[in-house]
Image (spheres, rainbow, N blue to C red):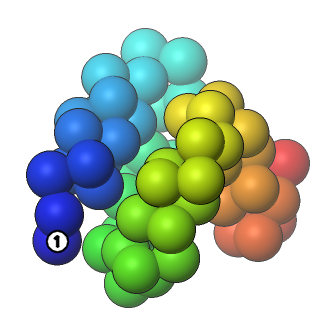
Amino acid sequence: MVGIVLRFIAHVAGLVWRYGVSKVNQIIAWIKRNHKTVQLWLERGVTYGTIIGWIMNTLGMG
C-alpha cells in the first residue's frame, strides 16, 4: 500500500470515537481489500469524508 492510503487508514482509525470500533474495523478491512481504488480516489482529490461515506454506503452502514 502507498503512503497516501496508509495516512487515510490512520485518519479512519482516529474516528473510533465517532463510529465505534466495529464499524472502523470494517471500513479499514474494506480499504485494505480495495486499496488501489482508494488510492485512485485520493489521487483524484476526493475528500476523506466523501470516501468514508462511499465505503459506509457500500457496507450498508450509511
Front-most of residues 54 and 41: 41
- Relative height, residue 16 to residue 45 (above, below): above
**Amino acid found under the numbered disc labelled 1:** Met
Q: Residue at x 47, y 54 (%)?
A: 43
Quarter holding residue 54: bottom right
Q: Number of callouts in the render?
A: 1
Q: Can residue 22 be spotted in the picture?
A: no
Query: Where the N terminus falls, by quadrant?
Result: bottom left
- Asked if residue 41 is positioned above or below residue 58 in the image, the reply reads above
| Residue 40 position in % (x across, y down) | 50, 68
Look at 15% across and 52% down and name the residue there: 3
Q: Secondary structure at mark 1?
A: loop
Which residue corresponds to mark 1? 1
Above or below — where is 24 with respect to 56?
Answer: above
- Which x, y percent locates residue 5? 29, 55
**Going 49% across and 51% down the picture, which residue do you hit?**
42
Camera-side residue of 41 and 21: 41
Q: Residue 48 in the image: state x and y as whole percent.
A: 56, 35
- Residue 7's image quarter? top left
Is residue 54 visible in the rendered image? The answer is: yes
Q: Looking at this view, name the residue that lies furthest to the front.
A: 44
